[in-house]
Amino acid sequence: MTAEPSAPLRRSEAEPEPVAVDGGPAKPPRDAFLQGLRASISTPGFVLWGSFIGFGAMTHDFGWPLWLAAFSTALIWAAPGQLVLAGALASGAGLAGATFAVSISGVRLLPMVVAIMPVLRSERTRFWTRILAAHFVAVTAWFEGLRLASALPRAERMPFFFGLAAGLVVGSVVSTATGHAAAGLLPRALAVGLLGLTPMYFLMSLERGADGFAEKLAIGLGLVIGPLAGLLTQEFDLIATGLIGGTAAFFAERFRTEQAGS
Amino acid sequence: MTGSDTALLLVAVVLAFLANDLWRWLGVVASDRIDEASPLFVWIRLVATALVAGLVAKFVVAPSGGLAQVPLWLRLAAVAIGLAAYAAGRRSLALGVGAGAATLVCGVAAFGY
C-alpha cells in the first residue's frame, strides 16, 4: 500500500505517532479501518452481495417483512445460517427444529474463528474486542481477512478487519433489502432468477471450500439424502441429512485411510 | 402477514443469532486449546457440510415459494449450466452463479412459467 494522498485519510498533526507492535510502523487505527472498508469493495464482496440479493428475494417469497430480512443479515451475519433458517421455517419446521438446524450449520464458524484470531489479535487485544471480531467471521470476511490482514503490521490488522467486515455487512444489509424490494417489483422471470442465486452460490461455495475426499463425499451424500429425507420428515430432515451424510463420510474416510495404511 | 407471525419470525431470527454466534464465541474461548484435527471436530464439520448440501438440494429439487412454479427440468438445467460455467471459468463463483441465474431467467421468460 502506497501513501494515500486523499484528504480524509491523512493523519492530523495533533495525533500521537502510533506505536508499532509487530512488523514495522503502523498506520493509526482509523486509517487501517478505512483501508479495510475500501478492501470490501472487491470481487468477493460483489459475489457475496449478489447472494444476499438472492436471500432478500427469497425472504420476500416466504413472506418475511423487509425490515426483518435486513435485520437478520445484520444480526445473524451468516448466509448459510440464514438460508437454513428461512428454508426450515418455510418447509414447516418449528422454532426448535429451525434453531437446532441453524446451530448445526454454524459449527463451521468455530474452526474459522480459531484460525483467524491468532492473526488478528495482538497482546493488547481485549477479550470483548475478540468476541466482536469473532462475530464478524463468516466465509467471505474470513477468507479475505486472513489473506489481506496477514500482510499488515500487527497493530493494523484488527482495525483493518473491522473495516473490511463493516463494509461487507453494510453492503449485505443493503443487498438483502434491495433483493426483497426487487422481488416484488421486477418482472416474474427476473424475480425467479434472483431466487436461484442463493442455492447456486451455496452449491459452488461448498465445492470450492471442500478440501479432501471426506468433504466432497459429505456434499454428494447431502445432495442425495436431503430431498429424500424431506419426503419423510419436514421437521428434522436437515438434521437427519447432516447426521447420516456426515457420519457416512466420516467413516468412509477412516476406512480409506486404514486401507491405504495397511 | 399478521403481527403474531412477524413476532414469531423475530424470535426465530434472534434464536438463530444466538445459536450461530455460540460457535463464534466458543472459537474465541477455545482459540488456543482446540484441536482442529480431532476426530470429533472432523465429524461435526462433515455433518454441517452434509446439512448445507442437503438444504441446497431441497431448494433445487423440492423448493417452496416462487421456485416451485418453475418446472424441475428447468431448475436442474440452470444448476447444470451454472456448474459448467463455474468449472469452465476455473471455479469462478461469479460466472457460475451468473450463468445459472441467467438460464432460469431465460427459461421462465421463454416458456412463460
Image (cartoon, grey):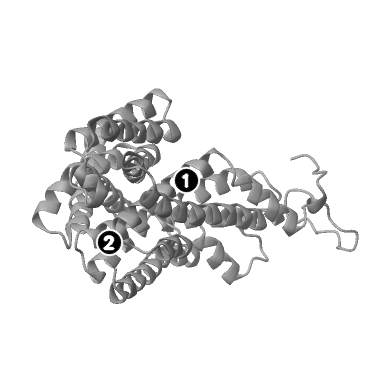
Residue at image coords 17%, 51%:
A244
Chain letter behind tag 1? A
User: Does B15 appear above or below A54?
Assistant: below
Element marked by disc 2: helix
The answer to whether mark 1 and mark 2 are in CB contact below 8 A is no
Q: What kind of element bears circle 1?
A: helix
Q: Which residue lies furthest to the right in this view?
A: A13
Is residue B28 at all visible to an observer of this figure?
yes
Give the residue displayed 12% in from the left and 59% down from the top: A233
- Residue drawn at x 24%, y 59% as measured from the top left: A90
In the drawing, does residue B62 fall left or right of residue B78?
A: left
Up the image or down, B16 lies above or below A194; here it is: below
Q: Can residue B41 be seen in this view?
A: no
Give residue A21's position: percent from left, percent from top.
74, 57
Residue A212 in the image, given as x and y percentages of width and height: 34, 37
| Quadrant of the frame with the N terminus of chain B | bottom left
Label 2: which residue? Answer: A101
Q: Which residue has dot 1 on it?
A: A48
Foreground residue among A39 and A134: A39
Question: Does residue B30 appear to the left or right of B75 in the view shown?
Answer: right
Q: Marks 1 and 2, how far apart in space?
A: 22 Å
Q: What's the residue at 33%, 63% (across, down)?
A: A103
Q: Earlier in the sequence, mark 1 or mark 2?
A: 1
Q: Classify residue B9 as left or right of residue A174.
A: left
